[in-house]
């Protein structure tokens, strides 16, 4: 069990394209952070280090596999209800003519999000973490085996909705992309600094709702840059399409940069 958040070590299920086939395996239980009755602080720190070290080694393996296959992988992170799946649906449809695309969906239960992505015509695999609150590198590696993406694919990893633990677990991705909805409050970057510090890009979503909310965009972005001065920001509405072209162009630029680095 996670020493911080209480997420359990029950079965994690990977649901591949043929939904009836399910792969079971035990996830790594995260030990990052704090309350574990009967364990000293020194022992907890050692457990944390061991777990994250093991995850980092597996993430490095994923990263090497991505590089060998020419994949460009983005880890999409946010709290529940930020609009991740809606944004991915629109993104997949917009970029399907340019890239081979695959999606790994992470949720505690159900295959709802993977089914939504598959309805766009895109390959998708669902990872159900049970009581786990984040994806781990080993889960992703097994999910990719099931997904079997086309070489040189654009890969989206929709992490479990959670602004805490996913910040700590490297999956081997090119970058983390944080989605923050204007319905969540402008102080989230200060409340959950590790997530915004770990992310290269912030997508401020649901801007079509701004006329109906008391949300200070300037203050929110100032908070994000206070936590991470290097973070890039794009304001979007996955519902209306506002700002989405800037998001697509960001992906294209990053993909081009990655390809150029591979030639060096």
Image (cartoon, grey):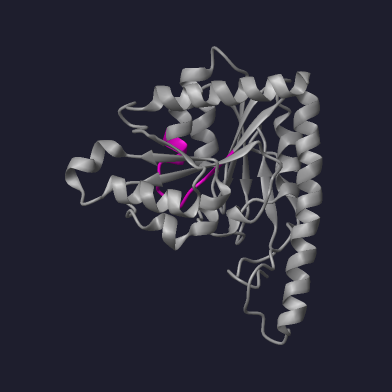
Residue 80 appears in the rendering: no
Screen quadrant of the C terminus: top right
Q: Which residues are magenta?
A: 75-86
Q: Position of residue 77 (x, y in %)?
A: 53, 46
Above or below 37: residue 63: above
Counting every numbered tag in the picture gives 0
Q: Is residue 107 magenta?
A: no
Residue positioned 55% across, 57% down in the render: 194
* Quadrant assignment, res 52: bottom right
* Quadrant assignment, res 168: bottom right
Above or below 64: residue 140: below
In the rendered structure, the answer to whether residue 212 lies left or right of residue 162 reads left
Residue 27 appears in the rendering: yes
In the rendered structure, the answer to whether residue 163 lies left or right of residue 32 reads left
In the rendered structure, the answer to whether residue 209 lies left or right of residue 152 reads left
Residue positioned 50% across, 42% down in the render: 231
Q: Residue furthest left?
A: 212
Q: Position of residue 46 (x, y in %)?
A: 78, 72
Q: Position of residue 49 (x, y in %)?
A: 76, 65
Q: Position of residue 139 (x, y in %)?
A: 72, 47
Above or below 93: residue 55: below
**In this orientation, which residue lies closer to the viewer: 175 or 224?**
224
Residue positioned 81% across, 26% down in the render: 68
**In this orientation, which residue lies closer to the viewer: 3 or 215?**
215
Screen quadrant of the N terminus: bottom right
């Amino acid at each position: 069990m996670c020493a911080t958040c209480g997420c359990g070590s029950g079965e994690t299920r990977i649901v591949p394209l043929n939904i009836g086939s399910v792969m079971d395996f035990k996830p790594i239980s995260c030990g990052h952070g704090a309350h574990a009755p009967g364990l000293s602080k020194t022992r907890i720190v050692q457990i944390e280090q061991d777990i994250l070290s093991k995850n980092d080694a597996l993430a490095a393996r994923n990263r090497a596999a991505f590089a060998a296959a020419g994949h460009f992988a983005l880890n999409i992170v946010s709290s529940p209800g930020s609009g991740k799946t809606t944004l991915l649906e629109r993104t997949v449809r917009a970029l399907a003519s340019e890239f081979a695309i695959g999606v790994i969906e992470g949720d505690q239960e159900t295959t709802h999000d993977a089914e939504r992505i598959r309805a766009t015509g895109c390959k998708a695999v669902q990872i159900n973490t049970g009581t786990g609150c984040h994806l781990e590198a080993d889960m992703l590696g097994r999910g990719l085996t099931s997904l079997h993406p086309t070489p040189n694919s654009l890969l989206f990893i929709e992490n479990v909705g959670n602004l805490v633990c996913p910040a700590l677990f490297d999956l081997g991705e090119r970058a983390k992309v944080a989605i923050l909805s204007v319905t969540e409050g402008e102080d989230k970057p200060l409340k959950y600094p590790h997530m915004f510090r770990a992310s290269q890009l912030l997508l401020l979503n649901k801007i079509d709702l701004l006329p109906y909310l008391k949300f200070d965009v300037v203050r929110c972005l100032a908070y994000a840059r206070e936590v991470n001065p290097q973070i890039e920001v794009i304001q979007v509405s996955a519902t209306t399409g506002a700002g989405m072209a800037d998001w697509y162009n960001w992906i294209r630029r990053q993909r081009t940069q990655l390809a150029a680095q591979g030639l060096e």
